[in-house]
Image (cartoon, grey):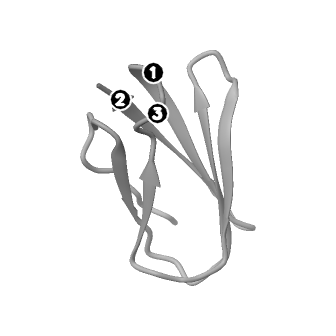
Amino acid sequence: GLSVQAYPNPTNGTVYIPVMTNREYQISISDVSGKLMNKFEVTTISDSYQLDISSYKTGMYLINLVSDQETVAIRVLKN
């Protein structure tokens, strides 16, 4: 399956997500209360995806990667 880590973690704003897959997938970010902060469709296949959360408040966020085969959840701490 998809084995994914986000870095740097904790982050000050930019998060890189190296994704080893050749499928289209969706990225969603929510805060700890479950509120959806943002959502992206990723249709181009590249080695890593760059996410800018510099405008978000300090705290823990949950990044979900969803493909047609699986879902991966990554916790990221925003400083």
* Amino acid at pointer 1: Lys
Looking at the image, residue 16 sits to the left or right of residue 23; the answer is: left
Q: Earlier in the sequence, mark 2 or mark 1?
A: 1
Check the image and name the residue furthest to the top: 33
Q: Are marks 2 and 1 in contact (CB under 8 Å)?
A: yes
Q: Nearer the viewer, residue 1 or 46?
A: 46
Identify residue for label 1: 57
Q: CA distance from mark 2 to mark 1?
A: 7 Å
User: Residue sitting at 28 percent across and 38 percent down?
Assistant: 11
Element at badge 3? Answer: loop
Looking at the image, residue 26 sits to the left or right of residue 4; the answer is: right
Check the image and name the residue furthest to the right: 68
* Amino acid at pointer 3: Ser
Q: Position of residue 68 (x, y in %)?
A: 75, 67
User: Residue sitting at 39 percent across and 19 percent down?
Assistant: 58
Element at badge 2? Answer: strand
Q: Nearer the viewer, residue 71 or 53?
A: 53
Element at badge 1? Answer: loop
Check residue 55 in the rendering and tell me which mark sits there, or answer none: 3
Q: Earlier in the sequence, mark 2 or mark 3?
A: 3
Camera sees residue 5:
no
Q: CA distance from mark 2 to mark 3?
A: 10 Å
Q: Quadrant of the C terminus?
A: top left
Check residue 78 in the rendering and tell me which mark sits there, or answer none: 2
